[in-house]
Amino acid sequence: MNSAKAEEYLRKIKEGQVPSHVAVIMDGNGRWAKKRGLPRIAGHKAGLHTLREIINCADEIGIKIMTFFAFSTENWKRPPLEVRFLMSLPEEYLQKDLPALMEKNAVVKVIGNYNRLPRRTLNAVSHALQATRDNTGLIVIFALNYGGRAEILEAVRNIAAKVARGELTPDQIDEQLLADHLYTGGIPDPDLLIRPSGELRLSNFLLWQMAYTELWFTETLWPDFKREHFLEAILEYQKRDRRFGGIKK
Ligand code: IPE
Ligand code: IPE
Ligand code: MG
């Protein structure tokens, strides 16, 4: 695909409505590196370039919220060296890119279980959250040590504790209340999920929130994923008929 194609996509996209919230599973870094005879961590590093390009493009076309899956609760199963490298990436990325994010007026948010993140990663994250909290532009959410089931479980425990303390009654528990107790409380559900690298699964990502999300998959590996792939996904999204269980108007 070439940039002329991307410009054509862009023209078409401008005729319709862009999704408000796009979630991305950044996958395929390891295979990208393997294909080149490089260590897996080289793939993770290359993936950072894609992240930058996609954030720029999302901002350019007026998307309001981007959520990126960076590290799952299951990724701790990987070799310690790879885990350590993955944990160093938020720090590297946020330190280098915070000025650019500030310039975009972007807000950084993080979802996931913070407890197990190394101190240095936590410090970088806290700094970025603090620095961007009053910005009003694109919201960039990173899922770090995130698992959809763990998130729902934590929400249920918190709600149960409120019931036990007499702050809530069981009949006050509805979908909205549960949603408000998730890490994503207050954030609208994703309209579109993009998963590169050919895997056709959710891998425990935003299970509650993606009940009605449109899914878009591509064989392209995350480090090879470019602006034109992103625009292609948005254009495809615009052609979908979202019925939410209703019937076509
Ligand atoms: C995604 O790439 C990065 C993380 C899961 C942290 P992978 O490392 O899963 O790459 P593949 O799937 O092995 O190619
Ligand atoms: C999902 O990718 C997690 C992230 C991208 C952070 P994985 O590579 O871990 O998922 P599986 O193991 O293929 O399902
Ligand atoms: Mg993978």
Image (spheres, rainbow, N blue to C red):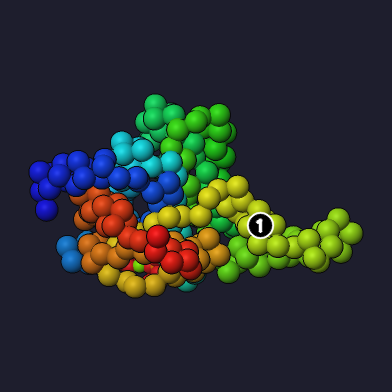
- In terms of image quarters, where does ligand 3 lie? bottom left
Residue at image x 43%, y 49%?
Answer: 21
Indicate left or right for 248 with 187 as reference: left
Indicate left or right for 220 with 128 as reference: left
Pick out the residue farthest to the top. 103
For the residue pair 245 and 159, the one nearer the viewer reads as 245
Please say whether residue 238 is visible from this viewpoint. Answer: yes
Image quadrant in which you'd find residue 222: bottom left
Residue at image x 39%, y 26%?
Answer: 103
Q: Secondary structure at mark 1?
A: helix
Please say whether residue 83 is visible from this viewpoint. Answer: no
Residue 44's spot in the image, x, y percent?
32, 56
Does residue 203 sit above or below 130 in this rendering? below
Residue 106's spot in the image, x, y percent?
44, 34
Indicate left or right for 105 with 237 as reference: right
For the residue pair 244 and 202, the one nearer the viewer reads as 244
Residue at image x 60%, y 47%?
Answer: 186
Give neighbour class at mark 1: few <14, some 14-19, many 20+ (Cα, 10 Å).
few
Indicate left or right for 21 with 181 as reference: left
Identified by mark 1, the residue type is: Gln
Pick out the residue farthest to the right. 166
Residue 14's spot in the image, x, y percent?
26, 40
Is disc 1's CB within 8 Å of ligand 2? no
Q: Which residue is mark 1?
A: 176
Residue at image x 30%, y 65%?
Answer: 217
